[in-house]
Amino acid sequence: MRSHPIAIPCTLLVALAAAACDRGSSTSGAGNNAAPPPKTLSYWASNQGTSLENDKQILEPELKKFEQQTGIKVKLEVVPWADLLNRILAAAASGQGPDVLNIGNTWSASLQATGALLPFDDATFAKIGGKDRFMPAPLAATGAAGKPPAAVPLYSMGYGLYYNKKLFQQAGITNPPATWDELIADGKKLTIGGKYGLAIEGANVSENVHHAFALAKQHGADFFDAAGKPTFDSPGAVAAIKQYIDFIAQDKIAAPGNAEYAANQSVADFATGKAAMLMWQVVGANLKTRGMNPDDYGVAPVPVQAGATGSKATSSMVAGINIAVFKNTKNLDGALQFVKFMTSNEESITLCKAFGSIPPVKEAQSDPAFATPELKTISSVLASNAAPLPQVANESQFETLVGTAVKNLFAAAAAGKPTTTESVKAELVKAQQQMPAS
Amino acid sequence: MLSRLRRAGLPYLLLLPALLAELLIHLIPMAVGVVMSFKLLTQFFIRNWSAAPWAGLDNYRVAVDFRAPIGESLLNSFWVTCSFTFLAVGFSWLLGLAAAIFLQESFWGRGILRTIFLIPYALPVYAAVITWSFMFQRDTGLVNHVLHDQLHVIGDKPFWLIGDHSFIALIVVSVWKTWPFAFLTLMAGLQNIPRELYEAASIDGANVWQQMRQITMPALRPVNQVLVLVLFLWTFNDFNTPYILFGQSAPEAADLISIHIYQSSFVTWNFGYGSAMSVLLLLFLLLVTAVYLAFTSRWRDADA
Amino acid sequence: MPKSPMAPPASFLWIRRIFLTVLTLFTLTPACVMVSSSLKPLQDVQGPFRWIPSTLTVRPYIDMWSTVPLWDYFVNSVIVSICATVLSVAIAIFAAYAVSRYRFRGRRVFTVTVLSTQMLPGILFLLPLFLIFVSIGNATGLALHGSRGGLILTYLTFSLPFSIWMLVGYFDSIPRELDEAAWVDGCGPLRTLFQIVVPAAVPGIIAVSVYAFMTAWGEVLFASVITDDTTRTLAVGLRGYATQFDVYWNQVMAASLVVSVPVVAGFLLLQRYLVAGLTAGAIK
């Protein structure tokens, strides 16, 4: 019987298909028995260093240490920011994800609402050493109030006002501004000869929302009321955002071109001396790679209104990265051991030193590595003058809508259109009406 | 008897792999997506989407309520996408047609030009679009450098990535990416036209432009019918270009519907709503395709 | 010497020259920017635009391999794209043969359904597809999410509709007499397919292969969700040059050029077939 002509191509197809269906990665196991917990963990780290490979190089030795201590092998994947939220989302929807992961701390409440993250109640916290080990500010940015935290603080960051010492000297300014009026006055003095007083990352949605939040707090406004309903168009919020836009529109201390910055160009402008001031989160390590030494710049708290006290003296939002555990993890004990390891004093010091951030662990903060002027300033801001972004389930929508509204306002201002309280309010009302009714 | 069964069943067997693939990757997920559009699928329910509460037509109602901001911005996005697609496909097709016609006759350098014209299609999408976004930067980009500093054509350096001019930037990038495909397809179509037709026409006294109108264009009609439809569908649904150019929040003037839906679903965790908008988009495209095919087939039949 | 009646007039020639020159500039400018930027130090790229680098450096070409695991991404992309292309073309050949050579019930429905998938916005079925992959993984242990296989399956399906469409057109243009001659010789339908139809359709098949390959090579959205760091493809991986600290423009351009060289070389080789192949396939 002669061989069927279809046999060959069919075999080829099947072989190709089989070869193609190779697994590039190991899944979290189709564990369906009561065997002892697997000696592996999968961990999604976020990009904190100069590149994905750089993150891997910093984390791998620590993971080896963990393996030596506990015998658990950690499979690391560094996920770029562009993909992280999408991947977490897909993992939450499908139940198929890592055991431990980094999340931006502003995402905590939104992710908490999905129910995909393990809540850290007191018992769980006890397993990793207790709540008291952590500074209160980063701890407040771990989930909605009244519910157990959905994550644990890992790296802590905050905003500071970075200023170019030489340019300040040349303009005859002796001290960094402490109030907004001083900042505008200084900015005007510094805006000469093609240079500008302030650099703004106007097209970056998260940066916009972070500044809008702190400014709104200074005007006594919050973006959500006590019941969790959005109040984007409150007079305080409108005034706050108008103040921010006016840096380009009215005061003209920031270059109009800043309205399209979304790739850290403002950091580049500051590092090359094109702008004299920059409001950014612990950017010292980044400035170093751009050739700016710690001696070239000073760090002061971001200004507040003259005579402000209490919550009106909020100079920064509480920024940072949290570490969370997926509820679906098949290795709960291992995951908690890993979280304990990563937030231990020793690891906190090592990792925060490497990434240039501030440890949220009280004891770790006393390490001399964090006693630089930059980190000391920002630590003290975090300790007393910082507030977390609203910990509501709709936080992601809030960030997107308000951040985009500010981006649109900057674009209009840079194009020369007049910025008035009405135009700002209209944009914010539009943003608020797009918030889902919950 | 068995062989007759075999013969009757053979076409179905041949189609089976294609059907299975389409079922698994396109049809079933699409059905799931349509079901999602009838549910209140936000971050609260994403963990178990099938247990999410039914929202009936609420998602659709919000999408088509053009007086409310969400519906209004969707409508705006829709118009922007329509005008974008019309212009981008139009220019790509014109450029492709002109280039194909001009490269019909052999001349020195034709092969080199053909290769050069394929470069946009060969470059990875991300690299090409990121290069354009790099060129469109206001202060440090090539476009403003040439227009402002070197040619002094414009007064102030305009923004290309934010504001109203972003629409122009979007069209430029899309045309740059798309026209080589039109060029390839039309060039292939031109090869099929017998030279005798042109010779006969020129002996009759028709000049180049008349020949084009009377011989080339009618002969290309079947090619054009398919090409324009395909370009329209691909351009309308294009996600990569605006996403890489503008990030996840596009300026209003360039808010293409694919990015708009992405922002409403993935970025804001509202999948029921995003699915509803996608279904509306799909219905619109089905309608346009049906009308287009009916119209052009009738035209073609009348021609033959 | 009398001008032949076929020779185009001088005005036509001049219009052609001007048009082609402008078009060439338009097409090549980004490519030139990529080349020039890939040889600049990072400060140059971030500063005001200059045509010529202030200092010529090949550092980007060296650093780009270590900033991002470029080689791994390249290998992944090649594997995924080639497998998707081969499978897609194979499946399309079978399907197109059926549609072209047989009149069977459901033929219309099939072509319309396949055509209508071109209209599906990717966002609509991205999440459901991932969920289906995970369900399959949980049910059978065959992990399609995070694997190259899942991506291959996805990409081959993306290019299937247009491929089938083109191949049907192309097969239609191959005369039935060839088929009938083969039957007279005692060939079964499949033998006819592989020994008569396919060899006659080689240009069309090559054209369709190029299309399928480019579809897989450049897809970003689905790759960003379905892959993990060991299976990530170039299309997604190139975004890794935009890090928390900086966007390494010069390295992105260098990497893009390097990974495009094989593709452009392939285009050069297949150019003739591409043109011939799209001919009859485009006419229905």
Image (cartoon, coloured by chain):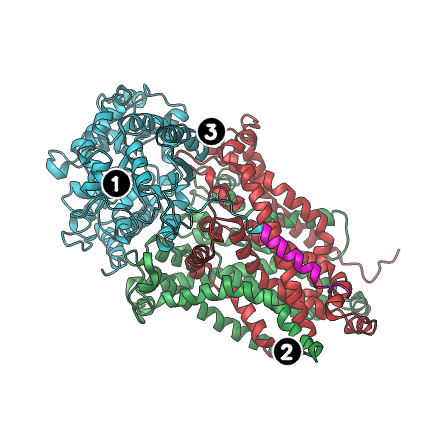
Which amino acid type is shown beneath numbered disc 3? Answer: Gln
Q: Nearer the viewer, residue C89 or C167?
A: C89
- Left-right relation of B223 to B161: right
Q: Secondary structure under badge 1?
A: helix
Q: Is residue C211 visible?
A: no
Residue pointed to by mark 1: A211
Q: CA distance from mark 3 to mark 1?
A: 28 Å
As drawn, B279 above or below A224: below
Provide the major secondary structure of the magenta segment: helix
> Which chain is displayed in green in the rendered image?
B
Q: Is residue B223 magenta?
A: no
- The quadrant of the rendering that contains the N terminus of chain C is bottom right
Please report contact status of discs 1 and 2: CB closer than 8 Å, yes or no: no
For the residue marked with disc 1, what is the amino acid? His
Residue at numbered disc 3: C43
In this view, the residue in front, C26 or C41, is: C41
Left-right relation of C231 to B203? left
Q: Which residues are magenta?
A: A1-19
Q: CA distance from mark 2 to mark 3?
A: 65 Å
Where is B17 relative to C215, above or below? below
Return the chain for callout 3: C
Chain A drawing hue: cyan
Tell me what hue chain C is rendered in: red
Q: x, y percentage for residue A351? A: 33, 28
Label 1 to label 2, Cα distance in Å?
65 Å
Q: Residues within 10 Å of mark 1 (few under 14, many from 20)?
A: many
Extreme-right residue of the structure: C1
- In the picture of the structure, the residue carrying the numbered disc 2 is C104
